[in-house]
Image (cartoon, rainbow, N blue to C red):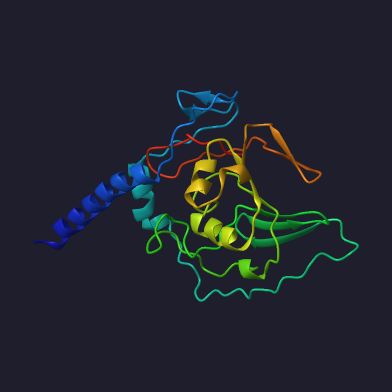
Amino acid sequence: MSLILLLILFILGLVILFRITTQLLAGAQYTKDKKTHLVDGVFVIKGIIEDNKSFKDVLAWQFKKADKKKWDQPYTTDTVPYTPPSSNAHTKVTFINHATVLIENEELRIITDPVFSKRASPFGFIGPKRHHDPYLPLASIPKLDVVLLSHNHYDHLSLESIREIEECFVPQYIVPLNNGQFLERAGVPTERIVELDLFESFEYKNSRFTLEKAQHWCSRSGTDRNRYLWG
């Protein structure tokens, strides 16, 4: 059997595996009785430009070497110990990685899109792998009051990281509509999850959190694009 045929069979096997796993990874459509930007089970936001890419487009992008640049190796970033905000600081903001940011004031410690896992993927053995450790390790953070999620792409919503947070803290989760189901899969109790529609607000410990519109989209598999709100 030729090498080319083996490669074709391997790719076909990956496609079949992808189709099977997408059904397992996808969440349910939004069906709750609430005013929202929903059309036939899909969130449609006025002013957001759609850039639909098919699975074929993704494969073509992955195998197009001309667009790929080799990452300079080795690349290391020293982690830093946690230090609390100074007494005269109103708010302290610490960048951790990508969209993961720790925001602290006198009343709250808030983390956004927490990703501490090695890969931005549903699998631990394959998928985009981080090139350096988080700037601030989760284990060094003494307390978390609120977890904010913007959307459910794997580089923003890591169920592994949510499980780690749940082992250490008891935070309030604030997420866009229809994303709470993924947190429940990670063991977060429903009563600690608040789902927001666009421009809707939630008050927590004298702070107001409002979901604003963003140019983006949502998906956890190849069959569930924009079933979940983002912001």
Where is 146 relative to 44, above or below?
below
Instruction: Find residue 3 and report its horizontal and vertical position in percent.
Output: 15, 62
> Number of labelled discs?
0
Residue furthest out toward the right: 88
Residue furthest out toward the left: 1
Q: Can residue 59 be seen by looking at this rendering?
A: yes
* Residue beneath the point at 49% across and 27% down: 31
Q: Quadrant of residue 53?
A: top left
Left-right relation of 169 to 116: right
Q: Can residue 174 be seen by looking at this rendering?
A: no
Quadrant (top left/top right/bottom left/bottom right) for the C terminus: top right
Where is 159 relative to 53, above or below?
below
Left-right relation of 123 to 36: left
* Residue beneath the point at 61% across and 63% down: 168
Name the one closer to the observer, 158 or 171: 171
Left-right relation of 207 to 181: right
Instruction: Find residue 72 and report its horizontal and vertical position in percent.
Output: 50, 71
Quadrant (top left/top right/bottom left/bottom right) for the N terminus: bottom left
Name the one closer to the observer, 35 or 115: 35
Instruction: Find residue 77 and report its horizontal and vertical position in percent.
Output: 61, 73
* Residue beneath the point at 77% across and 54% down: 108
Instruction: Find residue 216 and report its horizontal and vertical position in percent.
Output: 56, 39
* Residue beneath the point at 50% across and 42% down: 181
